[in-house]
Amino acid sequence: MAGVWRCMLVVVALGLWSLAMSAKSRQRPQKRPRKNQGVEEIGLIQPVPNIDIQRMTGTWYLINVASKCAYLINHGISVEPTTMTLTRPNNPGQTLSVSTKTRHNHNCWEILQVYHLTKTPGQLTLKGDRPELNIDIVIRDTDYTSYAILYYQKRGQTTIKLYTRNTDDLPEPLLDKFEQLAEKERFGLAYMFPFPTYSHCGDVAKDYIINCVPTC
């Protein structure tokens, strides 16, 4: 169960709350994961040159995910519409505030997190309870106004996500680009999971907001 929690934290950058609560009470010793052959280390993945983090702020719609997360493999056909909103705090420093909204059991949920900027522009960190639980993030490609492709890596396991600014008329060349990048990381079509492009959550009731700041 704890493995599902960690996997979903990478997949939607928010964690699956119901599983998270179970995971806290049923922690199991974790084996050291095998190193994925053919998967690039996050430090070797080149971020967008001269990235402008301020232009990354605003709302992004999750369109597709390439991942070998067990949860997605077993439940990929039932994923829910998901959005991510990035903002710079009033005292921005070296962080981005992250709000992720999605549905679970017919309710809208919101998870609040913080991405920490690193010394390398375009590389971010979502901190875990311990350094080995950190998630490293690279903004691999974006034009700021229509799409962004982000890489997430934790303990050698990589997930790639395609976000867009809107869900209307997704251009075929963009979807092809995402698939080509995923294939370089050895994600075939069986490991690509499209997300719904309709019925996204709006305002979320207070009781359905999970604050994962500083960590969850």
Image (cartoon, helix red, strand yellow):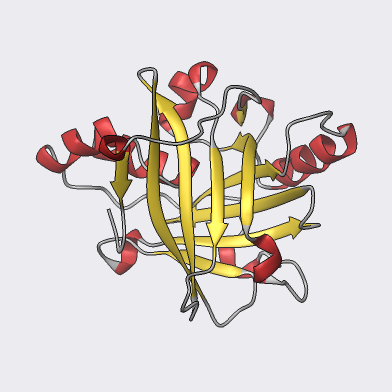
Q: Name the one closer to the observer, 126 or 82.
A: 82
- Residue at 33% over, 59% down: 133
Residue 6 in the image: above or below residue 135: above
Query: Where does the image place residue 90, in percent across and percent down from the top left?
Result: 48, 74
Query: Where does the image place residue 183, in percent across and percent down from the top left?
Result: 72, 40
Label count reads 0
Q: Is residue 110 visible?
A: yes
Relative to 175, 38 lies left or right: left
- Residue at 78% over, 73% down: 49
Residue extending furthest toward the left? 25
Q: Is residue 41 visible?
A: no
The image quadrant that residue 111 belongs to is top left
- Residue at 82% over, 32% down: 170
Q: Name the one closer to the observer, 42 or 175.
A: 175
Q: Quadrant of the N terminus?
A: top left
Residue 179 in the image: above or below residue 56: above
Q: Name the one closer to the observer, 15 or 4.
A: 15
Relative to 203, 65 lies left or right: right
Relative to 101, 134 lies left or right: left
The image quadrant that residue 52 belongs to is bottom right
- Residue at 64% over, 76% down: 121
Q: Name the one closer to the observer, 75 or 200.
A: 200
Query: Where does the image place residue 24, in percent across and percent down from the top left?
Result: 15, 43
Query: Where does the image place residue 62, in percent across and percent down from the top left?
Result: 61, 38
